[in-house]
Amino acid sequence: MSTTIPIRPNALPKNYPAVPAVYPTALFRLQVEAVQRYLYETELKEILTEAAIPLDVLNVASRRVMLTVAHSAVFMQALQEIIDDDKAVDYGHEAFIRCASMIPRSANIPFIQRTLSSGDRQNNRIRESLAGFNHETGMNVSLKWRDSGEFDLLDDAAQHCYGYIASTPICHIMTGYLEESIFYLLGAKVALAETNCMALGAATCCWHGTFG
């Protein structure tokens, strides 16, 4: 079980956008495919119902199901309550792998450990890679280097925490998802630790990254 049980207050906390952003249905369906290794079918249907997501979302031939980050957040938090935090990170890795074919990346993957000394060209390639990732996923991830050669990732899309409050960061699945996405987009294995979260009242969720 997750060590932190977040809550959704009746009134939306002020740091979240008043209207939840659209969540890409095609990506969600692929992420649900990865979920099925972690849950019984009855559990999956229960958390879809809890998130007010039509069960028809499981049928790829069905009409389009409109989802928002509010649906996604409830689904992911319910999933984290069933599996422990380590498995949530593992699931995040698997969820991205399922979605990778939909995410554009540069033909020449920039190896991010080398970008610290290789000038604007590599950094421009990183920004382009993240721009394509953001466009397809509906996220708003930006990367900031630290003088130590480590880095921070910031995102204010709140796809896994929209509407929640908690005492510690709660985007465990997103941590694994972003670790795998950095490897796919930028060619380096990294370890991420979420250091701040919109569920704590922050303006963005933030992860500190180190090279694995």
Image (cartoon, rainbow, N blue to C red):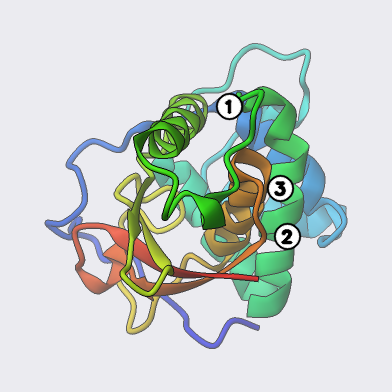
Q: Is residue 84 visible?
A: no
Please provide percent x and percent y for residue 209: 48, 68
Look at label 3 and name its amino acid: Ala
At 70% from the left edge and 27% from the top edge, which residue is drawn?
A: 56
Of the pair 212 and 25, the residue shown nearer to us: 212
The alpha-carbon separation of the residues under discs 3 and 1 comes to: 14 Å
Residue 100 higher or lower than 159, as above or below: above
Q: Is residue 166 visible?
A: yes
Location of mark 2 (residue)? 91
At 49% from the left edge and 55% from the top edge, which residue is drawn?
A: 74
Label 3: how many Cα within 10 Å (few below 14, some 14–19, many 20+): many
Helix, strand or loop at label 1? It is helix
- Please tell me whether mark 3 or mark 1 is closer to you in this view: 3
Going by the image, does 172 lie left or right of 109?
left
Location of mark 3 (residue)? 95
Residue 81 higher or lower than 56, as above or below: below
Going by the image, does 13 lie left or right of 90?
left
Quadrant into which the C terminus falls: bottom right
Label 2: how many Cα within 10 Å (few below 14, some 14–19, many 20+): many
Q: Quadrant of residue 116?
A: bottom left
Which label is found at residue 25? 1
Question: Contact, CB < 8 Å: mark 1 with mark 2?
Answer: no
Residue 155 higher or lower than 55, as above or below: below
Look at label 1 and name its amino acid: Thr
Please provide percent x and percent y for residue 52: 52, 42
Helix, strand or loop at label 3? It is helix
Q: Indicate which disc, 3 or 1, sits on the residue closer to the N terminus.
A: 1
Look at label 2 and name its amino acid: Tyr
